[in-house]
Amino acid sequence: MTLKQLKQKLNENHQLIFKELGMTIEVFNNNVYSTCPVHGGDNPRGCSYSPSKGIWRCWTRDCHQEHSNDILGLIQGVLSEEGSREVSFKDALLWACETLQCDVPMSNSKGTTTEPPEEVEISLENKINNALKRKIVNHTPKTIDIDCDVQIPSKYFIGRGFEPETLKHFEVGDCGYCENNLRDRAIIPIHEDSGKSVVGIIARTLKEYRLPKFLFHPTGFDKRFYFYNYHRAIKHITDNNIPYLYITEGQGDVWRLYEAGVKNAVSIFGKTLSEQQLTKLKSMRESSLIILTDDDQAGRESKVAISRQLSRTHNLIFPRIYNKDIGNMSIDQIKTDILSNLKGTY
């Protein structure tokens, strides 16, 4: 059996695999949803799996980027989390074959698991190594056009409590009509580092029943190479000689901080810093980072990870947040609870 055939069999028997992994699932529009079995959480649709494509995605912490986004990567991620250690791809492969009762791997006379035949082993190793090989590659931003009628400011986000002038500043609007998947979504443009062009879009559905709630456009946009609001934050830092950068999870956090007077804030599109983002931070002259991830389990885990990744190269400040996230705080709360102790950092 080849690796491709194994993946196909896993996809055909995905309900058995998910049951063995301890997942509680629901099926909606031919896709499978559950809480993320890798990092946990309480969002019943935080993880999705497409049986037709054979791929999965964690919508809250991007766990699919830590492992491969096929079903074998999901197995590897769950087994690693359960065992509190990194399970190798080969271990995940063996688990899958044993669960499906495939003829690979084989058992020897003593009943212990042996490796596949040498010729199969070499073939699998080559494919595994190619699939898992991770390195920071040169990235050339690709400018895109927003091919829809965007009405700025976004009425949706005004309804969420953001000021119209804030949304105009960040060019956030609603797309009422277009011929692609941006229709009936709030449009949040993502700029390349100089701010001269748009390279991606975050599109938030205007209809709560429509999934996914958020999507990146275009398909294949690689958020690992960017920070949201990077060009504005760096300009403010440079113009005012302020060696501090605020780091948040989401775009709404950046907007709310802006309304409170903080113009040197970026967001990381989630809970974790990518290798590319880490490289960019380590190359910046800003020596102090103010970390404002959400006040939940995932946000606290993110603080621990960032401390481990950057404590040797940067002065890290972790203000206490008395709300779930910055975006849900009032301006007065932000100024009183957070910024009162951070004078001179913005």
Image (cartoon, rainbow, N blue to C red):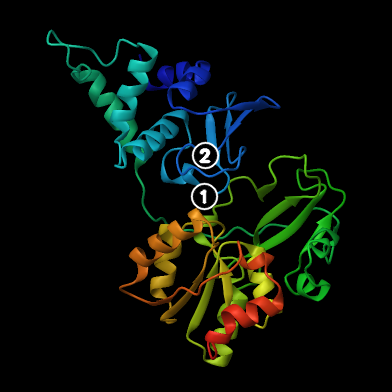
Residue under label 1, please give it: 61
Q: Which amino acid does label 2 sit on?
A: Cys
Given contact means CB atoms under 8 Å apart, are the residues at marks 1 and 2 in contact? yes
In the rendered image, residue 221, in percent from the top left (x then y), is placed at 59, 51
In the rendered image, residue 30, in percent from the top left (x then y), is placed at 67, 24
**From this viewpoint, which residue is outermost toward the top?**
109
Location of the N terminus by quadrant is top left
> Where 9 sits versus 149, above or below?
above
Q: How crowded is mark 2: few (under 14 residues within 10 Å), some or many (20 or more)?
A: many
Measure how far apart labels 1 and 2 are at the Cα level: 9 Å
User: Can see residue 262?
Assistant: no
> Where 217 sits versus 81, above or below?
below
Examine the image and state in which quarter residue 278 appears: bottom left
Residue under label 2, please give it: 36
Towards the viewer: 258 or 285 = 258
> What's the residue at 53%, 64% (across, down)?
293
Towards the viewer: 248 or 69 = 248
Q: Which amino acid does label 1 sit on?
A: Arg
In the rendered image, residue 73, in percent from the top left (x then y), is placed at 42, 34
